[in-house]
Amino acid sequence: MVKPNRSVLRSKNMLRKAYIELSTEKDASKITVVDVVNRANLSRNTFYAHYPDVSAIAEEIKNEFIQKFNLYLDQTLFSQKLDHPLPLLKRFEQFILNDEDDCRMLVHTQNYPIFLEKLKKLFIDRLVANIDDEPSRDKYGFLVFVHVLASGLIELYTCA
């Protein structure tokens, strides 16, 4: 895997930061390339060297967030049981706080309800996949618990 040079990383970070700032000020569908490059103090050529359009920045941020969320779920589900959800909620809160700017931007995008549903479904699917096959486990009760927990996590996410 080729490591991107620092100039590329710096430019992309500046463009992303500009987009995130703008998304908290106005509707994401109204953000233009000119808005982003002016805020980032970069040229249009630099923008187009990294992204085909403004929505590609949001997509990149969403995809990276989902990758981090999957990694978080891997670590969390491996390290604890779900009988006591408070540690899971505290870890999720820390996860959100670590990516607060990206989270704020994702909540302000035009199609964030779709994104939140995708996160919720991913979370539920991952937890349900971890149900053990103990005959004594109340699977319906566990599914209700998982849906309530997922809804609570999504609400925590939108309040970040």
Image: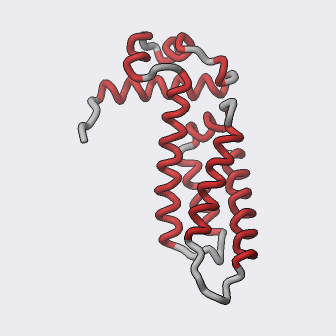
Q: Nearer the viewer, residue 73 or 134?
A: 134
In the rendered structure, the answer to whether residue 41 lies left or right of residue 88 reads left
- Residue 143 x/y as whole percent: 71, 70
Quarter of the image with the N terminus in it: top left
Q: Residue at x 43, y 17 (%)?
A: 47
Residue 146 against residue 123 in the figure, above or below: below
- Residue 150 x/y as whole percent: 69, 59
Quarter of the image with the C terminus in it: top right
Query: Residue at the left extreme?
Result: 2
- Residue 113 x/y as whole percent: 71, 40
Colour pattern of the rendering? secondary structure
Q: Residue at x 61, y 34 (%)?
A: 105
- Where on the picture, by quarter, is residue 114? top right
- Residue 35 x/y as whole percent: 56, 13
Residue 38 against residue 79 in the figure, above or below: above
Q: Residue at x 60, y 61 (%)?
A: 125
Q: Nearer the viewer, residue 147 or 10?
A: 147
Numbered-mark total: 0
